[in-house]
Amino acid sequence: MKTRLAIGKPAPDVTVHTLAGTPAVLGELWGNGRSLLLIFLRHLA
Amino acid sequence: MAQLAPRYAEIQALNAEAATVSFGTEYWARVWLQETASPFPFLLDPERRAYHAYGLQSSVFRSWMPRNLWYYVQAVAQGRETFGRRGDPHQLGGDFIVDSRGIVRLAHPSREPTDRPSVERLLQVLADLGEKG
């Protein structure tokens, strides 16, 4: 059982990849007055 | 996703960005993007580090709820490929909103595959943040 992420707590900053294979840090997607909606997909069906 | 994509401009107007994250392969990601015409930036997390960090579960039991079975019945009837190469069908998704300071403002890990917050709820949370670009 994984821990549910708590509202009001810092979001995990994880490095993923773009389709081009470039590392992308989630923490660079929010900030500068901009929030982020993260949509985690299931399998690509 | 189909309900959210047409609202992308509204999301951006609220000084927000949206991004999709998948644990699939680059090849199937490109196929999926072609099929769905999703407008959102697309990120790959093949090791599921982000999935784990955001508390998203993989569950055989929860993946075979009746509503999801109906989804697969429809997909098969439409001739769409649904299993196997497109990745682990037991991994659940979820939706999260993070404000500009990096604080979680909405956390919705799916309890079963069709469990997603409504588009209106997502837009309301973004609007309530009142982010100034």
Image (cartoon, coloured by chain):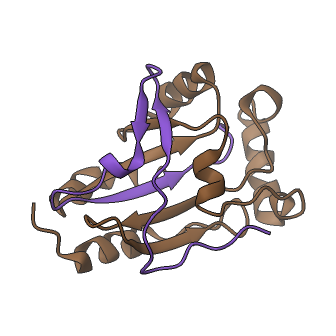
Chain colours: A purple, B brown
Q: Residue at x 32, y 70 (%)?
A: B123
Q: Which corner quadrant of the image does residue B112 belong to?
A: bottom right
Residue A33's spot in the image, x, y percent?
A: 16, 62
Can see residue A8? Answer: yes
Front in this rendered view, residue B108 or B34: B108
Q: Is residue B3 visible?
A: no
Q: Residue A34, how many percent across, how many down?
A: 21, 59
Q: Is residue B54 above or below residue A20?
A: below
Toward which corner of the image does residue A37 lie, by quadrant? Answer: bottom left
Above or below — where is A39 with respect to B129? above
For image coordinates 52% across by 23% down, the residue present is B30
> Considering only vertical position in the picture, is A5 above or below B42?
below
User: Which quarter of the figure has residue B120?
Assistant: bottom left
Residue lying farthest to the left in this orientation: B133
Q: Is residue B133 left or right of residue A45?
A: left
Q: How many marks?
A: 0
Q: Is residue B123 left or right of residue B4?
A: left
Q: Nearer the viewer, residue B70 or B46?
A: B46
